[in-house]
Image (cartoon, rainbow, N blue to C red):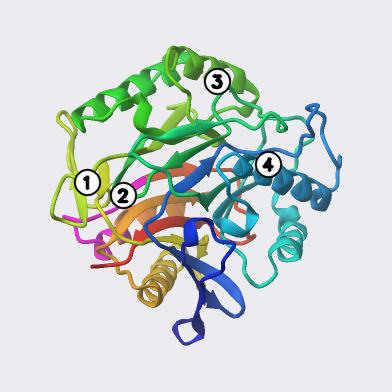
Amino acid sequence: MKQALLVLSLTACNLAAGAQMRHILSNGATTAVVVDEVPLAHTAQLLPLNGNGALVGPGNAALQVEQVLKNIALSLQEVRSGLENVVKLNICLRHPGLLQEVQTALRKQFGNKQPAVSYVTGNLPAEGALVGIDAVATATRRKGAAVTYHHSRQTRFPTAGAGVAVLPAGGAVYISGQADKGALGQATTGTLRQLDTTLRHLKLAKENIVQVRAFINPMTDIRTADSAFSVFFAGAAMPPVVYVEWVSKDPLVEIELIAASPARGAEQLEFITPPGMTASPVYAKVTRLNRGKKIYCSALYGTDTSNAAAEVNSLFVSLKNMLQAAGGNMEHLVKALYYVSDNEASTSLNALRRSYYNPQRPPAASKAAVSQLALPGRGITIDMIGVVAQ
């Protein structure tokens, strides 16, 4: 794989704020995108709903992708951005059989300048929806360090939060998934309170949150979770929220978030363990990025599927090669999201990532157990954010 990695630099006049993106390619596919230190728009999860809230293209994944991308474009218009500025797409498929059709639709839209893409499978917050997507895109430069929230009147959202929020250029924190016990509503409220405690330790507040990703079980109870979010954010702007269905029965919810944070240290990256938490050698409770170009990786899968350990090892080898091509390394990882559908792969991940991470510098992380992955025959995939090492 290492020999096949190429770098494509794009400095197009239509990139928001004149930002530069570098696309890391392998066999013609984008494996990562490196983006300058510019404001980044983060959307909520968009579904194939028209302006009246009706489902578009029942049973037709290609039409649904087209509608979702249209909705993303409408949302990005609110921050003077567009599909040409998209850095990363996080795609949820109703089932793995849709993967090829969705990939074809993305090639039709983006050609050979595709963003980094990751996939997960599971139920979605609208009956009949086959695909849901949230996006990260460069946005027009704005004065000040405040997060701004926007909502397109032309787009229907399945949840109560903002449609898009802008992370200002500069520092950011990535908080690993946290979870509380109990029924879904109670657990969601308790988890949000835990995250609020972490934010306050970091001298941040709700108004700094850019995006929230919640793993819940079951998706049919999304209104219960969304109601808890609405109560928690009462009196403040509710950021974009992305819901992903996982299969955990205890806890029923885990929530991670991204927040804007003024640079506070000389180090490019800080790995933080708030009071009351125990440091882990395989993931940081919080990472603070003070500066640097971000690396958004496409979903990674193991190339050796002979057994779970081989799959995890080959996955990390691919990650190291990708990071090297992008100007990063294993000590400059910001955030990891592991989707696992196999208990053996999960166990191997827990054991083997110790040998790949510096125990003083592991990324913030969440691990979500899902029923199946988008790529058949695989037990684990990694969605990673890194930073170009300075």
- Circle 2 residues within 10 Å: few <14, some 14–19, many ≥20: some
Residue 320 point in image, percent of width and height: 36, 72
Q: Which disc, if any, is residue 62?
A: none
Along the viewing direction, whichever of 143 and 197 lies nearer the viewer? 143
Residue 234, horizontal then vertical, whole percent: 45, 12
Question: Along the polypeptide, which appears first: circle 3 or circle 1?
Answer: 3
Mark 3–mark 2 distance (CA, rounded to whole Å):
30 Å
Q: Which residue is mark 1?
A: 263
Q: Are marks 2 and 4 in contact (CB under 8 Å)?
A: no
Residue receiving disc 4: 74
The numbered mark, 3 or 4, whose residue comes first in the sequence reads 4
Q: Which residue is mark 3?
A: 226
Q: Which mark is residue 170?
A: 2
- Main secondary structure found in the magenta portion: loop
* Secondary structure type for disc 1: loop
What residue is shown at x 68% (from left), y 64% (from top)? 110
- Whether the magenta-drawn stretch holds residue 64 is answered as no
Q: Is residue 364 magenta?
A: yes
Say if mark 1 contacts mark 4, CB within 8 Å.
no
Identify the element where label 3 is drawn: helix
